[in-house]
Image (cartoon, rainbow, N blue to C red):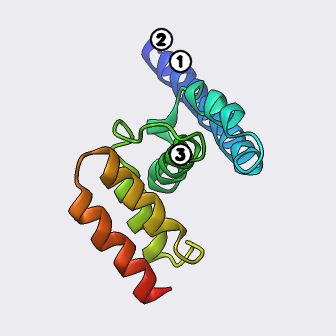
Amino acid sequence: MKRIIYTLALLLLVACGTHEDQKILNATDSLMAERPDSALKLLDGMKAVGQMGEEGVMHYAWNRAMAHYRLGQSLAEDTLTLDAVRYYERRQKVKGAEGSLLAAWYLHWTNRDDEALRELDRAMRNG
């Protein structure tokens, strides 16, 4: 009986953390253009990202990479950037060349400049 109660309590805590993180993640969308530093601070405080499912994790990865991009910071540690860009491209949720620009910036920061140039070329062709 104790095991069942403990399991239910744990599931409830994870669900609450996931719901709260989803609200924080959505709030970072509106902060990104004007206050990317604030968005990044909120993103860094999220605790249950891995519990959010693919869409939530990709949203988190995109926003984190975009905040670093807007602040002129390295994206080298944003290892899910390319996955997030491709995820949104497959769902046709990326506007214009924004995804390719973000991917190229990540590739540049990971010393893959030839790939970054190909990504920018692809963006120009697909405009």
In this picture, is 124 found above or below 61? below
Q: Amino acid at mark 3?
A: Tyr
Residue at point 35% right, 36% down?
77
- Report x, y in % for residue 5: 53, 18
Q: Which residue is mark 3?
A: 60
Crowding at dot 3, Cα within 10 Å, few <14 / some 14-19 / many 20+, comes out as many
- Report x, y in % for residue 34: 77, 46
Q: Which residue is mark 2?
A: 2
Q: Nearer the viewer, residue 50 or 90?
A: 90
Residue at point 22% right, 63% down?
114
Marking on residue 5: 1
Q: Amino acid at mark 1?
A: Ile
From the viewer's perspective, is 4 left or right of 27? Answer: left
Kindly report the distance in space between the C-alpha atoms of the residues bearing marks 2 and 3: 35 Å
Q: Nearer the viewer, residue 7 or 86?
A: 86
Residue at point 48% right, 66% down?
99
- Say whether disc 2 or disc 3 marks the residue closer to the N-terminus: 2
In this picture, is 72 found above or below 4? below
Kindly report the distance in space between the C-alpha atoms of the residues bearing marks 1 and 2: 5 Å
Crowding at dot 1, Cα within 10 Å, few <14 / some 14-19 / many 20+, comes out as few
